[in-house]
Amino acid sequence: MINSNKYDVIIIGGSYAGFSAAMALGRSLRKVLIIDSGKPCNQQTPYSHNFITHDGKKPSDINTRAKKQVLKYPTVTFLEDKVSKALKGETNFEIKTEKGETFTGRKLLFATGLKDLFPQINGFAECWGISVLHCPYCHGYEVKNERTGIIANGAIGFEFTKMISNWTKDLSVFTNGETSLTKEQNDILERNNITIVEDQIDYFQHNDGKIINIVFKNGTKTAIKALYAKPPFEQHSYVLQELGCEITDQGLIKVDSFQKTTINGIYAAGDNCTVGRSLALAVSSGSVAGAIINKELIEEDFT
């Protein structure tokens, strides 16, 4: 009798990278389990862009359609749950979930994404993904030439400002405290008519996530249409680190060009292992991971 809890591949985290890998594996006749808790980082983003054939669609709609298509393959199973622990054995991995389920898989793929760590600014979380943006390629066209701000400081802030200046010339940098820009950086920004504001931010005045004003602790405020920010992040799941997989200095899972981590049999795909956070890149890395995992299984079995 075949153990129903035994799989070729267990994918931890669904969404774009996970479903992309699952499709490649399902089409390769692999028995696959996808475990996902249903909390993507872009869950309140109204529209997705820069993803060919899906430009302007809701991320949730893309995800729902992807799940439906992937689950048409009879060897792919989906479970809404969260992985709480993983153990590495001699020939497979054992996965335990928060709901008390236990599964084994020959290979693991982590498509768990990242958790953004928002600053202590009231209104920031409510505006995130709607009018507080992380990527001009994903959202810049929709707010082109509008009055735009950047919450950033220092070298990162300077480089980010330089990039965003391609989409609008009505631009201000909000350092949220004393600037750490160098004099040379400051002079370059001023020559490009970019305002630097050092006042500390109190909160965002907004309407259903659409920012209206940045309100400062000194009582002043600035009207704004869009705001870019690069908040710090952490791994959404630390199970992978418990298995011994290496994390880079940037806080990302270390993978090679085939999405392999530093632990044999474990892969990662999507936002958790790349600086480029986009649907298109997540789908691409998931597809690569699925194909390489299948090839590795073939090599092991073809003796």
Image (cartoon, rainbow, N blue to C red):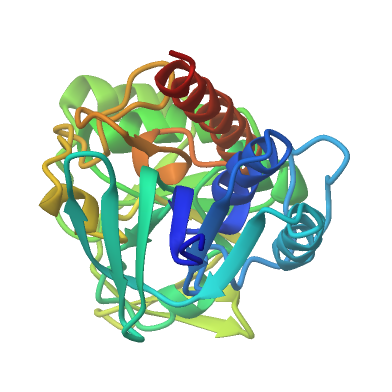
On screen, residue 157 versus residue 12, left or right, reads left
166 to the left or right of 97: right
Q: Relative to 2, does residue 245 appear above or below in the rendering?
A: above
Residue farthest toward the front in the current orientation of the protein: 1
Look at the image and tell me whether residue 154 can be seen. Answer: yes
Q: Say which residue appears at 59% left-offset and 57% top-offset.
A: 15
Q: Position of residue 218 (x, y in %)?
A: 25, 79
In depth, the one of 119 and 167 nearer the eye is 119
Residue 299, given in percent of the width and then of the height, sits at: 45, 16
Q: Position of residue 205 (x, y in %)?
A: 50, 83
Q: Residue at x 31, y 26 (%)?
A: 255
- Snapshot quadrant of residue 24: top right
| Viewer-nearest residue: 211 or 192 | 211
Q: How many marks?
A: 0
Which one is nearer the viewer's eye here, 218 or 278? 278
Q: Residue at x 43, y 19 (%)?
A: 258
Instruction: Tell me which residue sits at (27%, 50%) in the image.
Output: 93
Residue 58 versus residue 145 in the image, above or below:
below
Q: Is residue 70 above or below residue 289?
A: below
> Where, by quadrant of the figure, is residue 260 drawn?
top left
Q: Is residue 165 visible?
A: no
Q: Locate the C terminus and report the quarter of the image it occupies.
A: top left
